[in-house]
């Protein structure tokens, strides 16, 4: 019956992670997968999360199905975290299975109601953007985003490309901490982009998977809030995997901004319909943990302090690696490490050097040259710098 089924080629990042696990070298360093690790190379259990779990464990709860849209408290807190004090009656929010689930439900919703639209993603982008929107039946194309020469955003080329798009096309935007490049637009550029999106009648779909990892909770949501203030209809996929270090609980949310309360009710109903056709009801435990933290002033303050410490650590690692590389190769240009934001940095190393790093030095990056600095420890900075300089200077 299933003889004609082709083998799955595998996800390149997850496959590389399996290769790392099988590598017997004790000094190996994994900078390929997008996970924040503390300096002891562990996924942290945040104190605020642990306190919320302890609180929940003190009383026994039944485990009913949640509504299709998810926990009301979780949805409210998720909306406030992304949009601040924006009017609730104009935002349809549902709980989803992580950020990926938010993108999937959003893609299904858009395909049902905007079937002729094309989806545009940044070049480069998180690979699964193409898989999710392509899997929903969309034609997926790319707009210019990254400039290898400047290690930053090719903003003029990006604007020119978006100005040429037809009205109704969907543009996927990274709200902060761009994956994989770490190169973000500044606030003035976001304002200019909003004007283009509004003039052309495009539909932005923001992905905010790293809120708090760039410059702070509010600063990282600037683009979304500015677009919403300009009354630009938009979608947002948000995730708690990274900023709560709660990866396995699959906690995300999908938000759609609408014209008024009547439109919001219709959109919410269609999002619920999309959920019903996929998984019917989201899981409850992670949502209860996050709601407990965000609704309690003391736990919320503790979480924000811990999130700040994570952000500071990533910036410290960026600075330390920059200094180490500059000392070993004074003529090299490594300023991009200090300018880019979030978990990732785009090294610009060719694939041959990436594979040498892996094969000869046990330093694992994905073939695109993306490096997960959030997984690098202080002790790993010097050996990674040494390995990078060696492969860069070999003849």
Image (cartoon, rainbow, N blue to C red):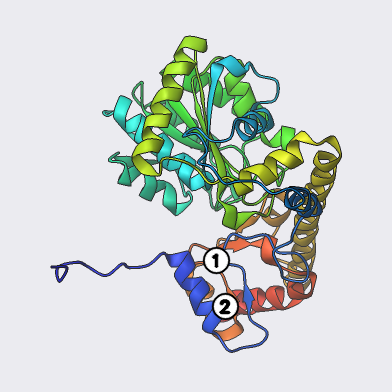
**Residue matched to label 2:** 357
Where residue 222 appears, x then y in whole percent? 67, 29
Where residue 14 appears, x then y in whole percent? 48, 67
For the C terminus, which image quadrant?
bottom right
Foreground residue among 89 and 195: 89
Where residue 75 appears, x then y in whole percent? 60, 32
Tell me which corner region of the image, top left, top right, bottom left or bottom right, holds residue 95.
Answer: top right
Please report contact status of discs 1 and 2: CB closer than 8 Å, yes or no: yes
Give the answer, above or below, for where 351 lies relative to 245: below
For the N terminus, which image quadrant?
bottom left
* Residue depicted at x 68% and y 65%: 375
Foreground residue among 172 and 382: 172
Give the answer, above or below, for where 302 lies relative to 203: below
Bin the neighbour count of mark 1 within 10 Å (Cα to Cα): few under 14, some 14-19, many 20 and up. some
Distance of label 1 from label 2 (alpha carbons): 10 Å
**SS class, disc 2:** helix
**Residue matched to label 1:** 349
């Amino acid at each position: 019956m299933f003889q004609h089924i082709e083998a799955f080629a595998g996800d390149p990042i997850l496959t590389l992670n399996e290769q790392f696990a099988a590598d017997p070298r004790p000094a190996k360093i994994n900078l390929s997968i997008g996970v924040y690790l503390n300096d002891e190379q562990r996924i942290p259990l945040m104190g605020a999360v642990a306190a919320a779990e302890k609180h929940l464990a003190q009383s026994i709860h039944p485990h009913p199905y949640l509504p299709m849209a998810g926990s009301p408290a979780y949805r409210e807190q998720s909306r406030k975290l992304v949009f601040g004090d924006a009017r609730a009656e104009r935002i349809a929010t549902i709980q989803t299975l992580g950020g990926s689930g938010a993108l999937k439900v959003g893609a299904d919703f858009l395909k049902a109601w905007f079937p002729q639209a094309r989806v545009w993603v940044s070049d480069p982008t998180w690979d699964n953007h193409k898989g999710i929107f392509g899997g929903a039946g969309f034609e997926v194309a790319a707009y210019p985003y990254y400039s290898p020469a400047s290690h930053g955003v090719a903003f003029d080329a990006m604007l020119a490309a978006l100005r040429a798009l037809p009205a109704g096309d969907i543009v996927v935007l990274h709200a902060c901490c761009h994956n994989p490049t770490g190169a973000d637009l500044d606030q003035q550029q976001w304002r200019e982009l909003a004007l283009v999106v509004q003039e052309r009648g495009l539909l932005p779909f923001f992905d905010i998977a790293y809120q708090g990892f760039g410059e702070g909770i509010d600063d990282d949501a600037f683009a979304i809030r500015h677009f919403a203030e300009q009354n630009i209809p938009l979608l947002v996929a948000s995730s708690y995997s990274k900023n709560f270090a709660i990866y396995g609980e699959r906690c995300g949310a999908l938000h759609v901004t609408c014209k008024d309360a009547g439109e919001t009710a219709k959109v919410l109903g269609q999002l619920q319909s999309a959920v019903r056709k996929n998984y019917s009801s989201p899981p409850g435990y992670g949502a209860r943990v996050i709601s407990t933290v965000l609704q309690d002033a003391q736990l919320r303050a503790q979480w924000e302090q811990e999130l700040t410490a994570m952000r500071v650590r990533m910036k410290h690692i960026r600075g330390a690696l920059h200094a180490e590389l500059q000392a070993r190769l004074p003529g090299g240009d490594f300023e991009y490490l200090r300018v880019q934001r979030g978990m990732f940095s785009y090294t610009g190393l060719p694939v041959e050097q990436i594979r040498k790093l892996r094969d000869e030095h046990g330093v694992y990056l994905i073939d695109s040259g993306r490096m997960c600095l959030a997984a690098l420890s202080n002790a790993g900075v010097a050996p990674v710098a040494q390995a990078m300089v060696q492969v860069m200077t070999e003849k």
